[in-house]
Image (cartoon, grey):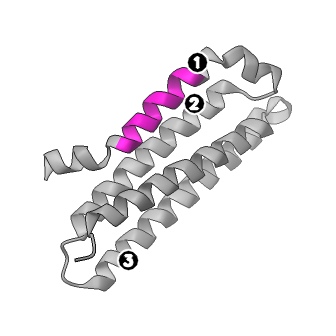
């Protein structure tokens, strides 16, 4: 299971490793576009961790003979991810005050789409059609 799990999350790790140095290298260009690179980096870290946990729970539940348990696990994972990220965004927007970077939040939303798309692709690999 462990080796298979690391094989499953490889695309998530690749995306994380690609985005993090890009954010560091293009920090000044992002600042010119009024995008706080630190906020986007934290969004990337949070999304990566949530995605890793979601794939772990899905791979654990996929062998359950009850199909409802699998669907409940997927829905619960997506629910927690969505509300966890919404809470993080709201906390950031209120805590940052006037210095907040709305563009960074939108860039984080773009990363959310990328990570969710990867999760769906990985989930489809867990139980291929016969």
Residue 57 is drawn in which quadrant? Answer: bottom left
The secondary structure type at the circle numbered 1 is: helix
Determine which residue is flagged by label 1. 24
Say which mark, if any, is on residue 41: 2
- Residue at (56, 33) in percent of width and height: 42
Residue 73 is drawn in which quadrant? Answer: bottom left
| Among the two numbered marks 2 and 3 on one chain, the one whose residue lies closer to the N terminus | 2
Q: Which residues are magenta?
A: 11-22
- Looking at this view, is 74 or 6 the one in front? 6
Residue 101 percent across, percent down from the top left? 78, 34
| Disc 2 packing (10 Å; few <14; some 14–19; many ≥20) | many
| Among the two numbered marks 2 and 1 on one chain, the one whose residue lies closer to the N terminus | 1
Dots 2, 1 in contact, CB < 8 A: yes
In the image, 80: left or right of 85?
A: left
Measure how far apart labels 3 and 1 are at the Cα level: 38 Å
Measure how far apart labels 2 and 1 are at the Cα level: 9 Å
Residue 78 percent across, percent down from the top left? 48, 64
- Residue at (22, 49) in percent of width and height: 5
Determine which residue is flagged by label 3. 72
């Amino acid at each position: 299971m462990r080796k298979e799990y690391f094989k499953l999350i490889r695309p998530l790790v690749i995306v994380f490793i690609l985005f993090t140095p890009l954010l560091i290298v293009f920090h000044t260009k992002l600042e010119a576009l009024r995008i706080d690179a630190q906020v986007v980096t934290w969004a990337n870290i949070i999304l990566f961790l949530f995605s890793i946990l979601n794939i772990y729970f899905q791979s654990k539940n996929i062998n359950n003979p009850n199909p409802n348990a699998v669907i409940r696990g997927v829905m619960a994972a997506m629910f927690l991810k969505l509300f966890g990220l919404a809470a993080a965004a709201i906390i950031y927007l209120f805590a940052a005050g006037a210095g907040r970077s709305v563009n960074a939040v939108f860039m984080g939303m773009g990363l959310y789409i990328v990570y969710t798309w990867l999760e769906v692709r990985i989930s489809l690999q867990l139980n291929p059609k016969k």
